[in-house]
Image (spheres, coloured by chain):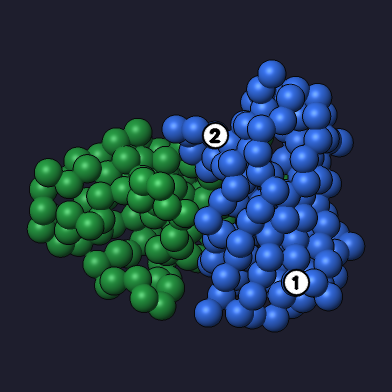
Chain colours: A green, B blue
């Protein structure tokens, strides 16, 4: 079965750039999206179709996808961006999530 | 405003059954594919099932195939998940999510607040 692998945790200083990776076999041949989930809340879509931002998502969130790796980049990271982030794609009609990355802003 | 409100969760014994509901409002429910996604306590997101807009095409994760049934009532703007033969490992918050309908991708643009299912004796 298809798997997506994320680092369990990433730390970043306020104002700096955070990068969260998501690895999967030929992931670049698929569309990837990203969700943000804060404690006790439902997930929120922040990037879809590799690079697109839904309405209302700040411009500091961006995405890329090539080869075997998709990357979520948060520029000028703010304290409010501290959350769990999940990548997601699909393979053989099955939706697959990565294991999630806890972003700490310190 | 799009709203998805789940209900029906609770405590159930192993081997028991439960039916979850997801009431949709603020959009044309009958035009969208819908999904169930679950999250065990302290764990990540796991896709469970999806159903097309008409309700005649469904797909399940292997872990629930044969035990769970997804359905919808477009007249009532409601999505369902019938869960049978429940196991301890089914314990999770269950979210319903709307599929955004983007080309060549399954993407969840709206999520409910979730309902907790606990399977324990």
Horizontal arrangement in the rendering, residue B107 relative to residue A105 (left or right): right
Disc 1: CA contacts within 10 A as few (<14), some (14-19) or many (>=20): some
Q: Depth-wise, is mark 1 or mark 2 nearer the camera?
A: 1
Residue A75 is marked as none
Which comes sooner in the sequence, label 1 or label 2? 2
What chain is tagged by disc 2?
B
Q: Which residue is mark 2?
A: B40
Residue B30 appears in the figure? yes
Is label 1 in contact with label 2 (beta carbons under 8 Å)?
no
Q: Are marks 1 and 2 on the same chain?
A: yes
Residue positioned 53% across, 56% down in the render? B113
Where in the figure is residue B87, as x and y percent of width and height?
72, 25
- Relative to the observer, which residue lies in front, A43 or A85? A43
Return the residue found at the far top. Answer: B121
Residue positioned 27% across, 72% down in the render? A59
What chain is tagged by disc 1?
B
Residue B77 is marked as 1
Work out which quarter of the rendered image holds the N terminus of chain A and state it. top right
| Mark 1 residue element | loop
Where in the figure is residue B86, as x and y percent of width and height?
76, 29
| Mark 2 residue element | loop
| Quadrant hosting residue B52 | bottom right
| Quadrant hosting residue A57 | bottom left
* Inter-mark Cα distance, 1 to 2: 27 Å
Where in the figure is residue B99, as x and y percent of width and height?
63, 65
Residue A90 appears in the figure? no
Horizontal arrangement in the rendering, residue A79 relative to residue A84 (left or right): left
Residue positioned 27% across, 44% down in the render? A103
Horizontal arrangement in the rendering, residue A19 relative to residue B44 (left or right): left
Where in the figure is residue B36, as x and y percent of width and height?
67, 51
- Relative to the observer, which residue lies in front, A34 or B66? B66
């Amino acid at each position: 079965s298809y798997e997506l692998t994320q680092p369990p945790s990433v730390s970043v200083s306020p104002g700096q750039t955070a990068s969260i990776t998501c690895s999967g076999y030929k992931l670049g041949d698929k569309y990837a999206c990203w969700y943000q989930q804060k404690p006790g809340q439902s997930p929120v879509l922040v990037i879809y179709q590799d690079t697109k931002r839904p309405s209302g998502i700040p411009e500091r969130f961006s995405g890329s996808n090539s080869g075997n790796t998709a990357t979520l980049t948060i520029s000028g990271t703010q304290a409010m961006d501290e959350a769990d982030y999940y990548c997601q794609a699909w393979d053989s009609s099955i939706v697959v999530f990565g294991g999630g990355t806890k972003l700490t802003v310190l | 405003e799009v709203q998805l409100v789940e209900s029906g969760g609770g405590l159930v014994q192993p081997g028991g059954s439960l039916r979850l509901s997801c009431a949709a409002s603020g959009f044309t429910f009958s035009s969208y594919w819908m999904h169930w996604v679950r999250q065990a306590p302290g764990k990540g997101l796991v896709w469970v099932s999806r159903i097309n807009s008409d309700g005649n095409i469904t797909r399940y994760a292997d872990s629930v195939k044969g035990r769970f049934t997804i359905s919808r009532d477009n007249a009532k703007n409601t999505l369902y998940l019938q869960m049978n033969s429940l196991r301890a490992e089914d314990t999770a918050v269950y979210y319903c999510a709307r599929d955004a309908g983007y080309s060549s991708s399954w993407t969840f643009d709206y999520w409910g607040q979730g309902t907790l299912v606990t399977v324990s004796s």
